[in-house]
């Protein structure tokens, strides 16, 4: 049963439609991440859930009750903002307690709640400071504390980590995950960082230009992208998307990838998706993630079908844990992810393994997945 | 170092030198000269008989000067408080995303573009019982209407306040509006989620955030009040009697029309001290503020 449900949500500013027919749902205790490029409408969607922006049409239900038209403070939600939005003239304690003060919670109760949250976030020693006297990470914690103290049905986070440095961001990410596991409250979390999305989410919604591109679990989004946008957006380094020609090979299919100055590379595909046979003789987009393109020794032993091909390596980038190699196939640069100690040199030809189980195909015109 | 780079280094100094010299002479030089005159026996023309601080003790013994000082206290406090409150109020109203803002803002701001002489003259006519508001009301048939403050020794100073507030509150409004626009939208959203009403949001969060604007407005208005001269001259000429005499008009009349240049100079130095006592703490707090993260 879904706890937060969004049905056919539309939102326009004047004649400009920002959100176009968004339908989503998340179960109680779930962690929904909204991800997409800048300006795609993530914050607008979150503000609509919070009630900070009126919606044009559609419905938003929390715990099976429509909250449309309800004041933000009546929706039983709490929100953490990108800029933290702390009240600059109040102390940390005052910031955390402000909502309770407005609701007329007695002072002793307020003190106890502040203390509880401060212990949880280890900000007890900061309670008497003003926000201007805090570091970015500390402000972030205070903003979380202000949300936690409400003990709401749904937490809303709008890019809460984007103003932190890389190391702190990873620490806070873990901390948010731990808090979620401990409290079990439903969370809707906005980010444009796909790594954050993958690590935190139980469900991911990918948005682009106000249109929901795909909605699913992190592994669905990662392994079975619906379209080229999702495939390209999720994952770092990005998925390689090459132009390939589908050829009939008896009853089976194979793809041919153009190689610089030589025979095209032909890979036969034993378990091709059924839709691919319609493309025999035509071009498709052949999508393969860097980790599915490895040196022969690094190939996944559990893979059902592995293709092989000799490729001219143009650049080698050792990254410590892995080595990335760049080659050229189908007229594009292709990144392969090899073992750290793989025996490979730039300017030489190496034999690479293609994990064909993991390859996805897209129609080059519609950019939709071929199933 | 070659000539070219030496020239480049010198050029700013050469360009600034004339203005620096002019400022040194005509501002600081004349301040020093006034300070010196205030300790001489100058009457109609400067003369250089040194009399120590006796001009100051004479000044503070003059009922006329006390009148000017107490008028300044009334005028400055009302002017600063009303302009700030009115300016903040107008700014808050304009900040409610109303459609006509583009039209209203210049309307309120426009009086600031007028000189105090024009403001004073206009208000003099408007408040004059014979031709202004009272006369108009009588013409419209409201015969019992009476508004003669400008002719009344006890109330004339409030007419100066009215005209000065009319002139300045639009400017104060612009200062506050800039401050309100600088408030992070997300703070207001956070307060909404916390359940605060609009009034509470302003009272507890936004207005306290305007502290630096209050301070700037205070400094601007306070020094305008202390310097106030042209408005009084145009509006009331310091009268009726000495009812609207302010330190600046006092200074002018003692220095140039009553042949008491020594006392006039000492009153000018007192005004300078008043302004410094406002500006220096302000600059100090501003400069210290910059060092804070
Ligand atoms: N008040 C408004 N009036 C008109 N258009 C708006 C308004 N607020 C946002 N928009 C537009 O709506 C679109 C979505 O904005 P939104 O803030 O939701 O983007 P976002 O996905 O959160 O981007 P980011 O990652 O940069 O925060 C943008 O194109 C923006 O220009
Ligand atoms: Mg945003």
Image (cartoon, grey):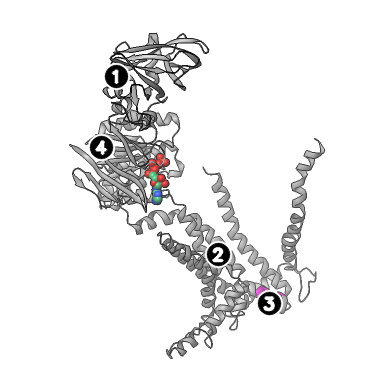
What chain letter is assigned to the residue under label 1? A
Q: CA distance from mark 4 to mark 3?
A: 77 Å
For label 3, count other residues whose C-alpha is less than 10 Å away and answer few (under 14), some (14-19) or many (20+): some
- For the N terminus of chain B, give its image quadrant: top right
Of badges 1 and 4, the one in the foreground is 1
Q: Nearer the viewer, residue A276 or A43?
A: A276
Q: Which residue is mark 1?
A: A272
Q: Nearer the viewer, residue A301 or A356?
A: A356
Mark 3 secondary-structure assignment? helix
Q: Which residue is mark 4?
A: A186
The response on whether ligand 1 sits within 8 Å of label 3 is: no
Q: CA distance from mark 4 to mark 2?
A: 53 Å
The image position of residue B133, as x and y in percent, is 49, 83
Discs 3, 1 touching: Cβ within 8 Å: no
Q: Nearer the viewer, residue B113 or A127?
A: B113
The image position of residue A233, as x and y in percent, is 39, 31
For residue A269, say whether it is visible.
yes
Q: Main secondary structure of the magenta part?
A: helix
Of badges 4 and 2, the one in the foreground is 4
């Amino acid at each position: 049963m879904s706890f937060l449900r969004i049905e056919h949500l539309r939102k326009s500013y004047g004649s400009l439609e920002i959100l176009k027919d968004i339908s989503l749902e998340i179960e109680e205790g779930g962690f929904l991440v909204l991800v997409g490029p800048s300006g795609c409408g993530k914050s607008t969607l979150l503000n609509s859930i919070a009630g900070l922006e009126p919606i044009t049409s559609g419905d938003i239900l929390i715990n099976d009750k429509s909250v449309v038209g309800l004041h933000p403070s009546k929706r039983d939600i709490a929100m953490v903002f990108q800029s933290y939005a702390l009240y600059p003239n109040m102390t940390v304690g005052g910031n955390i307690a402000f909502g309770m003060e407005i609701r007329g919670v007695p002072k002793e109760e307020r003190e106890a709640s502040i203390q509880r949250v401060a212990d949880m976030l280890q900000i007890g020693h900061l309670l008497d400071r003003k926000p201007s006297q805090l570091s970015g990470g500390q402000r972030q914690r205070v903003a979380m504390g202000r949300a936690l103290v409400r003990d709401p049905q749904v937490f809303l986070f709008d890019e809460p980590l984007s103003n932190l440095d890389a190391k702190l961001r990873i620490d806070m990410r873990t901390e948010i995950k731990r808090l979620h596991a401990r409290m079990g409250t439903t969370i809707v979390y906005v980010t444009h960082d796909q790594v954050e999305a993958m690590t935190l989410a139980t469900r991911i919604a990918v948005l682009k230009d106000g249109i929901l591109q795909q909605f699913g679990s992190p592994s669905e989004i990662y392994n079975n992208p619906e379209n080229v946008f999702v495939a390209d957006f999720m994952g770092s380094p990005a998925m390689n998307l090459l132009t390939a020609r589908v050829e009939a090979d008896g009853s089976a299919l194979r793809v041919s990838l153009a190689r610089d100055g030589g025979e095209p590379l032909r890979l036969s595909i034993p378990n091709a998706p059924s839709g691919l046979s319609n493309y025999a003789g035509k071009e498709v987009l052949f999508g393969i993630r860097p980790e599915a393109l490895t040196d022969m020794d690094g190939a996944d032993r559990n893979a059902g079908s592995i293709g092989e091909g000799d490729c001219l390596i143009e650049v080698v980038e050792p990254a410590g844990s892995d080595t990335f190699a760049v080659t050229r196939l189908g007229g594009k640069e292709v990144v392969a992810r090899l073992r750290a100690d793989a025996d490979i040199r730039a300017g030489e030809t190496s034999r690479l393994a293609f994990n064909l189980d993991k390859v996805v195909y897209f129609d080059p015109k519609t950019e939709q997945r071929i199933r | 170092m070659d000539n070219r780079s030496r020239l480049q280094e010198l050029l700013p100094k050469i360009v600034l030198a004339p203005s620096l010299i002019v400022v040194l002479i005509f501002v600081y030089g004349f301040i020093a000269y006034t300070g010196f005159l205030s300790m001489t026996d100058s009457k109609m023309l400067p003369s250089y008989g040194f009399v120590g601080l006796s001009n100051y003790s004479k000044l503070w013994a003059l009922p006329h000067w006390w009148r000017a000082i107490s008028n300044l206290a009334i005028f400055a406090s009302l002017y600063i408080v009303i302009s700030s409150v009115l300016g903040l109020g107008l700014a808050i109203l304009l900040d409610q995303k109303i459609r006509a803002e583009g039209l209203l803002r210049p309307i309120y701001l426009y009086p600031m573009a007028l000189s105090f002489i024009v403001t004073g003259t206009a208000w003099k006519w408007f408040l004059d019982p014979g031709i202004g508001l009272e006369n108009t009301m009588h013409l419209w048939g409201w015969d019992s209407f009476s508004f003669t403050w400008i002719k009344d020794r006890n109330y004339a100073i409030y007419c100066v306040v009215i005209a000065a507030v009319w002139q300045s509150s639009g400017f104060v409004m612009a200062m506050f509006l800039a401050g309100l626009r600088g408030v992070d939208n997300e703070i207001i959203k956070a307060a909404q989620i916390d359940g605060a009403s609009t009034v509470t949001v302003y009272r507890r969060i936004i207005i306290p955030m305007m502290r630096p604007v209050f301070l700037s407005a205070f400094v601007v208005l306070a020094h305008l009040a202390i310097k106030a001269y042209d408005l009084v001259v145009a509006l009331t000429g310091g009268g009726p009697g000495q009812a609207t005499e302010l330190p600046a008009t006092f200074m002018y009349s003692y220095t140039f029309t009553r042949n008491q240049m020594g006392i006039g100079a000492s009153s000018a130095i007192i005004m300078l001290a008043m302004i410094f006592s406002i500006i220096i703490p302000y600059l100090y707090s501003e400069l210290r503020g910059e060092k804070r993260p």
